[in-house]
């Protein structure tokens, strides 16, 4: 169960390198990369911004099925609570970081600039806190670790007072990230719509 959960948690992390290309859009780009909504399964096969999150969820589903089948064939046993808690965390994690691309696109209307901003946010959110957390709390006992998005996948020693990789903690962090992702997506969509209306007004001949 733990190994299956780790497969589901770690294997899709390669998608982090492609998040700026899956989530960002731009008003200055060709039609395929212009904002066209938030979630469309059909657009996932066309590679437009609205299909970015469905595409990620399709990858997660494929990994989850593969990990579940491996768990059943090798043990044999069905995936347990850790695996399903990791599914909740993964759904929240990817929704949140995908939504940051939507926010970048709403903040900077040019596609290349939005992707650059989104990449900088990803590095800042996942890369910068880690050395500081390890410097000030190498034994992983501080509650500050609980705010690091990847921490549910860390192996925590049994003598640690902070068990953030437990089932309930993975579910809690997943739900929080999911709620934040939905909120950021909503606000970004509103901001993008206002930007499109403004651009149309400027482009309209007098």
Image (tube, helix red, strand yellow):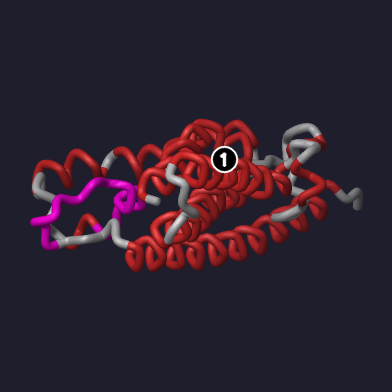
Query: Where residue 187 sits in the image (x, y, percent)?
Result: 59, 64
Q: Is residue 153 magenta?
A: yes
Question: In the orientation shown, which residue stands out farthest toward the right?
Answer: 206
74, above or below 162, in the image: above
Q: Based on the displayed image, in which of its 4 quarters is residue 188 positioned?
A: bottom right
Seen from the viewer's position, the closer of residues 117 and 139 is: 139
User: What residue sits 43% from the left and 59% below the top?
Assistant: 80
Q: Based on the displayed image, in which of its 4 quarters is residue 21 positioned?
A: top right
39 lies left or right of 79: right
User: What residue sits 26% from the left and 60% below the top?
Assistant: 164
Circle 1 packing at 10 Å, graded few (<14), some (14-19), many (20+), is: some
Number of numbered discs overlaid on the protein picture:
1
Query: Where residue 177 sits in the image (x, y, percent)?
Result: 45, 61
Query: Where residue 176 sits in the image (x, y, percent)?
Result: 43, 67
64, above or below 164, in the image: above
90, above or below 123, in the image: below
Q: Secondary structure at mark 1?
A: helix
Magenta residue span: 146-161
């Amino acid at each position: 169960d733990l190994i299956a959960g780790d497969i589901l948690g770690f294997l899709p992390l390669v998608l982090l390198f492609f998040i700026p290309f899956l989530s960002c859009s731009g008003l200055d780009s060709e039609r395929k990369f212009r904002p066209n909504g938030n979630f469309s399964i059909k657009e996932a096969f066309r590679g437009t911004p609205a299909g970015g999150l469905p595409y990620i969820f399709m990858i997660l589903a494929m990994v989850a099925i593969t990990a579940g089948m491996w768990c059943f064939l090798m043990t044999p046993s069905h995936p347990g609570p850790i695996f399903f808690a990791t599914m909740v965390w993964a759904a929240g994690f990817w929704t949140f970081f995908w939504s940051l691309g939507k926010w970048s696109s709403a903040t900077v209307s040019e596609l290349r600039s939005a992707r650059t901003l989104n990449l900088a946010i990803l590095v800042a959110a996942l890369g910068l806190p880690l050395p500081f957390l390890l410097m000030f709390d190498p034994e992983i006992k501080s509650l500050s670790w609980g705010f690091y998005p990847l921490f549910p996948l860390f192996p925590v020693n049994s003598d640690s007072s902070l068990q953030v990789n437990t089932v309930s903690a993975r579910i809690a962090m997943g739900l929080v990230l999911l709620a934040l992702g939905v909120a950021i997506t909503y606000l970004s969509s509103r901001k993008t719509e206002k930007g499109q209306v403004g651009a149309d007004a400027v482009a309209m001949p007098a």
